[in-house]
Image: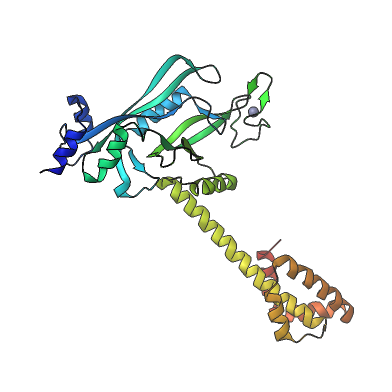
């Protein structure tokens, strides 16, 4: 018996010719009714979310265009085997007279998606058909988050208003504008998970933003290629800084040992070298300061400097000092 046929019979649906045409734009071979399962899913809305942020109607409309063709994943795992459903149409639905918390017409982004029926997708389809797996989270890039009280961009300027705080009769919110990318939507494994809903990524150069994004990723978020590249260059920059810090620490170790010897503290140089390796930068600076003070008592300042430059060479001393200007 053909397994696909039995699965198709299990999830009998009517798919219109127009819908089939839209779906077949994305398929390698033309699929027919009975070979695909279609369903509607609410991606997000324009009401205030748990971060005290909301999308405008225009943002939702732009996202509606961006989400067409985007594959949905299961369990936040963006590997091919988990990319199970694809959106073939998406639009903004106005649910008037229902209003949002800030008094606008309530709108939501509703997508239609399809899943090819096969053994691998059968369980998910059964859950969708039974109305179980309806909760999804979406990931999108947003360029602007504007203060609802004063209109300043809350990511590039600090206007002083705090999201979630009340100012007169208004609660401050971040108004999300100019979406740049709609990169994923996923069925949430645990409906109650903290970030179930909308995962917004803000592109910028501020470190706080990256740190927030890193912590979101650890909550099971997914990054787009563009965002991955930005995070990669941020990580490379950090690596470079770490390398400079390592060089600076080595330089400080050498300096501290030298000062110790000059100060005639009575500790043999190999023992001193081992001791300083266990110290952090601030401890090294403190110890170096103590040794230098002592050295100044032992030797006149002029000869101390001469010895110092003699060991490192004047040029090297200068370049090290410039390089690690703190
Ligand atoms: Zn403001």
Q: Residue 15, relative to residue 98: is it above or below?
A: below
Is residue 257 rendered to the left or right of residue 300? Answer: left
Q: Quadrant of ligand 1?
A: top right
Looking at the picture, how far across and down is residue 95, in whole percent? 42, 17
Tell me the residue at 85%/73% (across/down).
293
Tell me the residue at 25%/41% (across/down).
122
Judging depth in this view, the residue of 152 and 228 nearest the camera is 228
Q: Quadrant of the N terminus?
A: top left
Point out the residue furthest to the right here.
297
Is residue 290 rendered to the left or right of residue 74? Answer: right
Q: Quadrant of the C terminus?
A: bottom right
Tell me the residue at 73%/79% (across/down).
257
Q: Place residue 116 in its image quadrant.
A: top left
Judging depth in this view, the residue of 222 and 324 nearest the camera is 222
Judging depth in this view, the residue of 33 and 260 nearest the camera is 33
Instruction: Please tell me how many numbered marks the rendered image carries.
Output: 0
Q: Residue 243, relative to residue 139: is it above or below?
A: below
Q: Residue 266, relative to residue 251: is it above or below?
A: below
Looking at the picture, how far across and down is residue 16, in whole percent? 19, 24
Q: Place residue 190 in its image quadrant.
A: top left
Q: Place residue 305 in its image quadrant.
A: bottom right
The answer, for residue 245, to whether it is visible in the render is yes
Is residue 105 rendered to the left or right of residue 298? Answer: left
Looking at the picture, how far across and down is residue 186, in whole percent? 38, 40
Tell me the residue at 49%/51% (across/down).
231
Looking at the picture, how far across and down is residue 19, in whole percent? 22, 27
């Amino acid at each position: 018996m053909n397994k696909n046929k039995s699965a198709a019979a299990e999830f009998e649906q009517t798919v219109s010719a127009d819908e089939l045409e839209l779906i077949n734009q994305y398929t390698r071979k033309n699929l027919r009714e009975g070979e695909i399962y279609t369903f509607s899913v609410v991606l997000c809305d324009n009401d205030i979310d748990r971060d005290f942020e909301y999308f405008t109607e225009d943002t939702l409309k732009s996202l509606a265009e961006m989400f067409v063709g985007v594959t949905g994943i299961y369990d936040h795992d963006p590997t091919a085997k988990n990319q199970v459903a694809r959106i073939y149409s998406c639009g903004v639905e106005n649910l008037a007279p229902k209003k949002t918390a800030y008094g606008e017409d309530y709108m939501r982004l509703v997508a239609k998606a399809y899943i090819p029926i096969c053994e691998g997708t059968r369980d998910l389809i059964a859950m969708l058909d039974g109305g179980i797996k309806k909760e999804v989270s979406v990931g999108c890039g947003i360029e602007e988050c504007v203060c609802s009280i004063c209109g300043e961009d809350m990511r590039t300027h600090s206007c002083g208003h705090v999201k979630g705080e009340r100012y007169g009769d208004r609660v401050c919110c971040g108004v999300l504008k100019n979406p740049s990318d709609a990169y994923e939507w996923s069925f949430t494994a645990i409906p109650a998970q903290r970030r179930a809903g909308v995962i917004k990524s803000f592109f910028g150069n501020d470190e706080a933003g990256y740190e927030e994004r890193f912590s979101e990723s650890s909550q099971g978020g997914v990054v787009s290629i563009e965002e991955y590249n930005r995070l990669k260059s941020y990580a490379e920059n950090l690596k470079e800084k770490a390398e400079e810090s390592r060089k600076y620490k080595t330089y400080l170790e050498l300096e501290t040992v030298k000062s110790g010897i000059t100060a005639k503290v009575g500790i043999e140089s190999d023992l001193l070298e081992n001791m300083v390796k266990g110290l952090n930068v601030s401890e090294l600076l403190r110890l170096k300061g103590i040794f230098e003070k002592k050295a100044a008592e032992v030797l006149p300042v002029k000869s101390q400097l001469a010895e110092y430059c003699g060991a490192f060479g004047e040029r090297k001393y200068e370049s090290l000092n410039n390089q690690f200007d703190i």
